[in-house]
Image (cartoon, grey):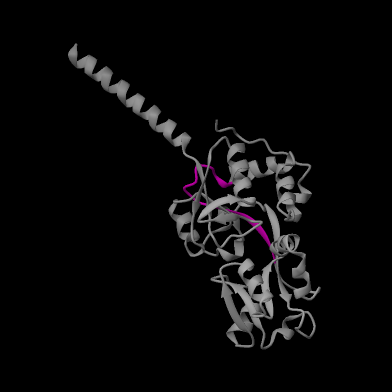
């Protein structure tokens, strides 16, 4: 009889442990990567902490739509691929797919918004608004960032001098002090800078050189508690009810063509609550 009781007790504790383990798995947050290479309006990072911007608000909205809690982890730019692959973070939702060639297409979600990089030209720089005018120019770039081949060729062939800074804001300060002839930056970052300081408009020409247009997406870890199809369904739900378009507009960004075309669609998603 004692043996039977022991067996029953053992079974009870095994079941109880399994339930607790399941509860812990279900309680795991969805962890998003960010870094100090991200800047407003994409992310507002102060003293290593994510304080605002699209990344914070979207991460919270996406996790909530999936019935999960959101968590955010600081990751340097050159560590994002490794942290995603290793499962230390679940998603990086400011990714542009061409810059992560080590991941197959099924690791990326549908687009969240469209981002455009441009080259601002200082008011004193002469010539047409194309790359030929940058010969001999001092160009502000972001440390560690790889630009399209046509721009990288300017630096590789020493036609122009690449001067790196941590972000676009630092490069705009250099432009203001006359230490740069041009700056490569996201159009959204330039619009935000202008809204804060209209005097910046007098430093540059009105015409810009287009560099690249990219869709920003979530790069999702194979270990993520939410799969790419589940995240895609949640994104479409946020599009359908207007939440994502409102956040994109409030952040000074632009909806991608694919998402704009899909505003009339809705996608039910499984609740994880």
In the rendered image, residue 17, in percent from the top left (x then y), is placed at: 34, 28
Q: Is 246 contained in the magenta span?
A: no
Q: Is residue 89 above or below residue 61?
A: below
**Residue in the image at 47% along x and 35% along y:** 27
Q: Nearer the viewer, residue 146 or 232?
A: 146
Q: Is residue 13 above or below residue 143?
A: above
Q: Where's the N terminus, which quadrant?
A: top left
Magenta stretch, residue numbers = 213-228
Q: Where's the C terminus, which quadrant?
A: top right
**Residue in the image at 79% along x and 76% along y:** 205
In the rendered image, residue 138, in percent from the top left (x then y), is placed at: 64, 82
Name which quarter of the figure residue 86 lies in: bottom left
**Residue in the image at 55% along x and 65% along y:** 101
Q: Is residue 14 left or right of residue 105?
A: left
Q: How many marks?
A: 0
The residue sitting at the left extreme is 2
């Amino acid at each position: 009889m004692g043996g039977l009781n022991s067996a029953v007790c053992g079974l009870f504790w095994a079941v109880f442990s399994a339930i607790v383990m399941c509860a812990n798995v279900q309680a795991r947050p969805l962890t998003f990567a960010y870094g100090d290479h991200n800047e407003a309006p994409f992310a507002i990072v102060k003293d290593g902490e994510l304080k605002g911007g699209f990344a914070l608000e979207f991460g919270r909205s996406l996790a909530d739509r999936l019935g999960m809690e959101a968590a955010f982890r600081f990751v340097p730019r050159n560590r994002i691929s490794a942290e995603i692959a290793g499962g230390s973070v679940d998603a990086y939702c400011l990714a542009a797919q061409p810059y992560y060639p080590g991941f197959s297409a099924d690791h990326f979600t549908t687009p969240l918004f469209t981002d455009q990089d441009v080259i601002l030209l200082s008011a004193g720089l002469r010539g047409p608004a194309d790359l030929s005018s940058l010969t001999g120019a001092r160009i502000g770039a972001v440390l560690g960032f790889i630009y399209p081949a046509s721009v990288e060729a300017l630096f590789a062939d020493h036609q122009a001098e690449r001067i790196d800074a941590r972000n676009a804001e630092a490069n705009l300060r250099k432009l203001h002090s006359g230490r740069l002839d041009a700056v490569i930056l996201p159009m959204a970052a330039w619009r935000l800078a202008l809204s804060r300081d209209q005097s910046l408009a007098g430093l540059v020409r009105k015409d810009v050189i287009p560099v690249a247009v990219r869709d920003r997406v979530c790069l999702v870890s194979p270990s993520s508690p939410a799969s790419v199809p589940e995240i895609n369904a949640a994104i479409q739900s946020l599009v359908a009810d207007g939440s994502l378009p409102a956040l994109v507009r409030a952040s000074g960004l632009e909806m991608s063509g694919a998402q704009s075309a899909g505003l009339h669609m809705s996608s039910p998603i499984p609740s994880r609550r």
